[in-house]
Amino acid sequence: MKAIMVPRRGGPEVLELCDMPEPQPRAGRNEVLVDVEAVGVNFADTVQTQGMYPDGPRPPYIPGLEFAGRVHESGERVMGFTHSGAYAERLCADRATLLPAPKEWSAAETAAFLVNYFTAYFAYEMAGLIVPPKAGAPRPSVLIHAVAGGVGTASVEVGKQLGVEMFGTSSSPEKLERVRTMGLDHGINYRTHDYEEEVMRLTDGKGVDAAFEMLGGEHTASTTRCLAEMGHLIVYGMATGHAPQFDFMTMFARNLSVHALWLAPLAANAEKMRAAWMCLSPWITAGTVRPVVGHTFPLAQAAEAHRLLLERKNFGKVVLTI
């Protein structure tokens, strides 16, 4: 079978299309063979390739965290999450971890769901916002960085269902306008405006109740200063490549809390994943949650897909099709 390999640490240039042996389900493991039709490309994939995750896979390995395809024996359409190995024509997966693919979704849309929407769900849960506000109560608010990206657009769709007032940052007015049509309340172009100043201006100096932060470096401290009293900072990445810096004096003064979010260990918790799926699936059925696929590439162009993410040129999800 064809698969993308990471033979050594590095950027997109290290990704290689190779011929690999067919995977075989292991006896006694409840594994099934899945014919992969599409793969979600995540910023985490680029971070793993560079070796920035201490517990990430080590070369040589097949990258890829999420996939959509068909169970080889039955033809059943499914989607799944894996530690690595999705950038391939076939893979083996634990049958119990697979979820049914929504009937109305394409393979690309299905592959774009798991990482982004479960990350968004757990971010809202950690912020205490997973329950919609009571009638008459003020709308809770959240700041979403990279709002035009995969997790960003998922957070907007989920936030709309929860009745949250959403502030989002992006690099262009065109991207922000597209996300506004999805439900974003306040778009902030970080190239032309200081988002910290804009958030405080738009909230009359109060700040937001929660912030989803995946930039790292000095942005973590700046985002902290966007929070209101008793606010929640959800840190789920470091796209700048720098470890988060914290403004502890602001945290003390406003009694703020910080939550670290990494989906990989959560995905191993069947009870938590089931609870998240029970919340998300009715929205899927109602058609109010549906992944935004902005770019698709064939498997052989995985390097180009990674470059698009690293250059911040994507809108919505980037997907590899097989």
Image (cartoon, helix red, strand yellow):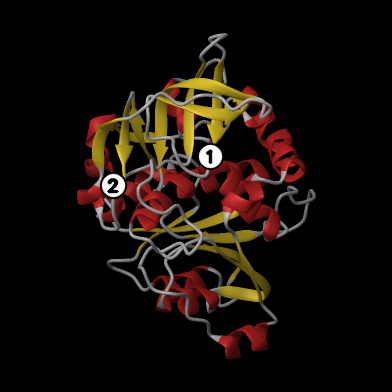
Amino acid tagged 1: Thr
Q: Which one is in front, 283 or 30?
A: 30
> Would residue 91 be found to the left or right of residue 50 on screen?
right
Extreme-front residue of the structure: 27
* Sequence-wise first label, 2 or 1: 1
Label 1: which secondary element: loop
- Snapshot quadrant of residue 267: top right
- Is disc 2 surrounded by few (<14), some (14 to 19) or many (20+) residues within 10 Å? many
| Residue at figure coordinates x 59%, y 59% from the top left | 261
Quadrant containing the C terminus is: top left
Disc 1: CA contacts within 10 A as few (<14), some (14-19) or many (>=20): many
Which corner quadrant holds the N terminus?
top left
Q: Amino acid at mark 2?
A: His
For the residues labelled 2 and 1, say whether their Cβ atoms are less than 8 Å apart: no
Residue 33, image x and y in percent? 52, 21
Residue position marked by numbered label 2 in the rendering: 306
On the image, the x and y values in percent for residue 162 come to 67, 45
Q: Residue at x 28, y 66 (%)?
A: 191
Q: Nearer the viewer, residue 27 or 291?
A: 27
Residue in front for this viewpoint, 321 or 123: 321
The Cα atoms of the two marked residues, 2 and 1, are separated by: 18 Å
Q: Position of residue 187 (x, y in %)?
A: 42, 56
Judging by the rendered image, the residue that carries numbered circle 1 is 82
Q: Residue at x 58, y 50 (%)?
A: 264
Depth check: 320 or 247 in front? Answer: 320
Residue 42 place in picture, x, y as percent: 41, 46
